[in-house]
Amino acid sequence: MAYPAPAGLTETQLRENIILLDQALYGLWNLGHNLIFAWTPEAKGLRVLVAPHPMLTEFALGDGTLPQPELTRRARLLDKLLSNQEHLDAHAFDAVSAALGIKPQFIELPFSPERKLGLPLIAAIAARYGVRMVEDRAVILFDAVGFSLLTPLQQVVQLNSLSCSVNAAYAKLLDREININFARTTTGDGFYIWNRMRGVEANVELYQLMQFILADNALAQERATRPESVPRLRACFHVGSHYEFYQSEGLNPTSFSYLVGQVTIELARMIDHAMPGQILVGKFNTLMHDEATGEDVRIDSLDFVERTRAPLRSLNGLKLAGSEVDEIACYLTGRRDGTGLWGISEYQMADKHGFIHRVYNAKINIHRRNGEPIYLGLREEDLPMDVPRTVADTDFTPMQA
């Protein structure tokens, strides 16, 4: 994300100010030994809370003698602190300092950071030296079926093919001025992909990206002279909480973040049960920021997929393999009831630890004007009959074409 220079400041001056602040934070970071937990601006610098990274678990778990109510209080305090994406005002900063038992440190600067950098830019710089918790970000997991059975050369070719599909899908959406600030990290035989931006619109755009990645992959499979050169994918989409952090690379924090947390754990469990060619959507119910209203709204999996349909109409006319898209239909599958309407099936999957994960089976049908339709995902009748399922608590709706 680009940050414009504050009024009266040249780009060169802004760059010099960024370097001064970054060098100061880098010194406190101490090659990754310490983390920046909070900060508040002062007239000529910043007050910051800095502590060794093991402090997170030490504070959360205590010495083993703390009662459960105190452990719960500490966990909530940490969640609230790490969920904060911005600065703390002076009063809140002092309260957190006292609660954590961390003495503030002062970073002296030859300028007013608030006026000569701006609070959003300071937050972006400081984020590289800390850990953040995000509650509402969507993440995709792609997995190449049978990847471990391939030769190393075939594995490289398949991962490159998947990367090409990601880039091609991104370019398609850019053509429609949908600029997803996406990031990805490899799992060895696939990718986690997420949108660095947050909110309902950002998560919907990520779902669109998933659709076009799968479509490009399907078209690449059709064109391939050797089938093993293009991966056969299974995909999972979920929204949930995670921690975002920056690993050390050489002597510096990386310029891109990594994710670890409940959403990535859920996706890993989901992909273990996904069939080749299947698309799974995890069951979630969370608050997301709605840019249209400026408010946080509670959205579950069924609401979310419903919200993805209207934006798809803006993609009609987009070309895939030389043929214009007439319609994109996305829906969660289910069985027909006695009146001829279709419900939505909710599936239960038990992982190796005995925990239950609830998911939905998704279908995406892309109809092209002068080309064959592209059918992504599995139909309800393609799924094993013995998979535990219930009808989701929703009104029956007609099956989408």
Image (cartoon, rainbow, N blue to C red):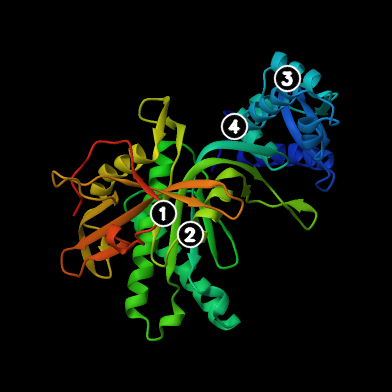
Which mark is on residue 157? none
Question: What is the C-alpha distance between the residues marked 2 and 3?
Answer: 45 Å
Q: Nearer the viewer, residue 126 or 57?
A: 57
Q: Residue at x 75, y 16 (%)?
A: 95
Which callout, 2 or 4, points at the residue further toward the start of the chain? 4
Q: Against 170, is 112 above or below?
A: above
**Residue 305 in the image, given as x and y percentages of width and height:** 33, 43
Residue where numbered disc 1 is placed: 280
At label 2, the amino acid type is: His
Residue where numbered disc 3 is placed: 93
Does the rendering let one see residue 130?
Answer: yes
- Report the quarter where the N terminus lies: top right
Question: What is the C-alpha distance between the residues marked 4 and 1?
Answer: 36 Å
**Contact check, label 3 and label 4, Cβ < 8 Å:** no
**Res 122 quadrant in image:** top right
Residue where numbered disc 2 is placed: 273
Question: What is the C-alpha distance between the residues marked 1 and 3?
Answer: 42 Å
**Res 36 quadrant in image:** top right
